[in-house]
Every structure is written in C-alpha cells, then in structure tokens.
Image (tube, helix red, strand yellow):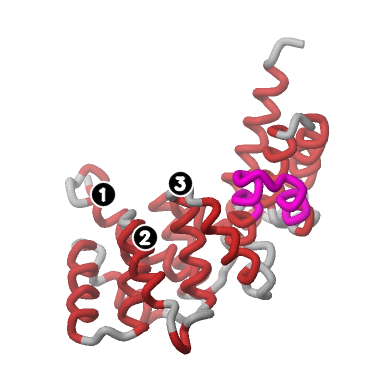
Amino acid sequence: MFFFNPHFYYVSFALQALCVIHCLRKGTQTNWIWLIVFLPVIGCVAYIFTEIIRDGDIRQVRSGIGSLLNPSGRISKLEENLRFADSFGNRVALADAYLASGRTEDAIELYESSLTGAFEENEHVQACLMIAYFKLHRYQDVLPLGKKVVRLPQFNRTHIHIIYAMALDQTGHPAEAEKEFSAMKGRYAHFEARYQYGMFLIRRNRPEEGFRLFREILDEAGHLSARERRTNRLWLNKVREELKRAESKPA
C-alpha cells in the first residue's frame, strides 16, 4: 500500500513544505498551517483544493509536485540557483525551503543576510524570521520584528501576530501580551488566537477567564459551517481537551 511505502514520509514532508510556503506567501488563513502540520496528507489535500487550485495557482502546484518524491533535490536545486546568482529572490526561496524542512538555523542565516538595501524592510522575510526565531526559542529576537510586522494589514490577527503575543509573554511582558491577544479576539473567528489567549490566562492564574473563553468558543462551534469546523478542528479539539482536563481535576 502507498502509505507503507518507504518513500511516503518524504512525499508527505515535501507536500507539507509546498503548502506551508504557499500559505505564508499568499497570506491565507494561518490556521491552515497547523492543519497541514498535524494532519499532513488530509490537511495538504484540503489546502490544495481549497486555496491553491481554487485561486488558479495551477502552475505553482505543477512546479511543486515535481519535487515531492525528492525533497532534498529541490533544496539542492535552490542551492545551485543561489550559487549561480546570489539574488534576493534566490536567497529567500532557499531560506523558505530550509525553514519548511526544519533547517531553521540555515534559514535564519539566509533571511538575516537578505535584509539589506532595498529589501531591508521586506515583510515576508521579517515574518519568516519571526517564525524561525520562535521555533528556536529566541523570543527576544521576535519582538523588534513583531512591533513592525503585526501592524501591517496582511499580518494582523494571523499566526505571526500570535507569535508576537506569545513572545511578549515569554520575555516577561504579560500586559503587552494580553493587549495583543485582546486585539485578536472576535466571535466566530480567530480560534487559534483565542485558544492561545485562554492558555495565557490560565498560566497567569486566571483560569475562570480562560475557561469562560473556551466555553464561548465551543458554543460558537455549533454555528460554524462544515468547512469552518474542519479548518479550525485542531483548536476546537484543544479547547475541548483543556475543558475536559479541568473538569477531571479534583475539587
């Protein structure tokens, strides 16, 4: 069977990389990233047919499929491109591939070296650097980028904004973190941000507020469309788990 083929892991991983990079570049709903990561095959197929093919990006799908059976081959090709022409585009394309494949330190090196001259304030690179820094627990490095990036319309109330709020919390700025979390609240939307806000409240010894937020989320879940429930399944399940854990604790 295909799922037991030894190459399946690499196919799945490359497909994830393709979808995550597309998601970051297009600014699509960032909850997709978590669906892609935690449900690789189902999440990627749903993303391709919902966001890529629907948007008419057939050419991008076609070019990415060629590298699915050999993800390291795509990176080698991008490295070759950079050696041939050390351009901003080639640097960022390789950095994106490194980030998606887990080579976070290599990605950071390229992203940082790309922020020069006319590209010093490039929003895509800054946002990807925030993700890379956060993955390596370099929360202090997230903050200066976050102050600039999250005010841009394409990053407001996105996963990038959430990373900024969480980095503020991790670096001892709970009041500022809560301000950012509060700015991302909204009924029937922003479930990742609201889940993280609830967890923030629980960590800050305000469990009643956190669990109240979780109950509000579950109340809204029954009114979501089937597609919205699928898209936000990860966060709805996490909310249920936290409430169940709280209920199971002895009084």
Label 1 to label 2: alpha-carbon separation: 15 Å
x 38%, y 52%: residue: 41
Q: Amino acid at mark 3?
A: Phe
**Is residue 10 rendered to the left or right of residue 220?**
left
Nearer the observer, 26 or 150: 150
Residue 27 pos. (x, y %):
56, 71
Q: Nearer the viewer, residue 251 or 174?
A: 174
Main SS of the magenta part reads: helix
- Give the x, y percent position of residue 192: 64, 50
Tell me the residue that label 2 is attached to. 100
Identity of the amino acid at label 2? Ala
Give the mark, 3 or 1, whose residue is nearer the N terminus: 1
> Which segment is the magenta one?
165-181
Q: Earlier in the sequence, mark 3 or mark 2?
A: 3
Q: Residue at x 52, y 58 (%)?
A: 141
Placement of 54 over or under 171, stated as above or below: below
Vertical relation: 8 (above or below) 121: above
Q: Which residue is mark 1?
A: 9
Pointer 1 local density, CA inside 10 Å: few below 14, some 14–19, many at least 20 = few
In the rendered structure, find residue 38 and report the number of the disc placed on it.
3
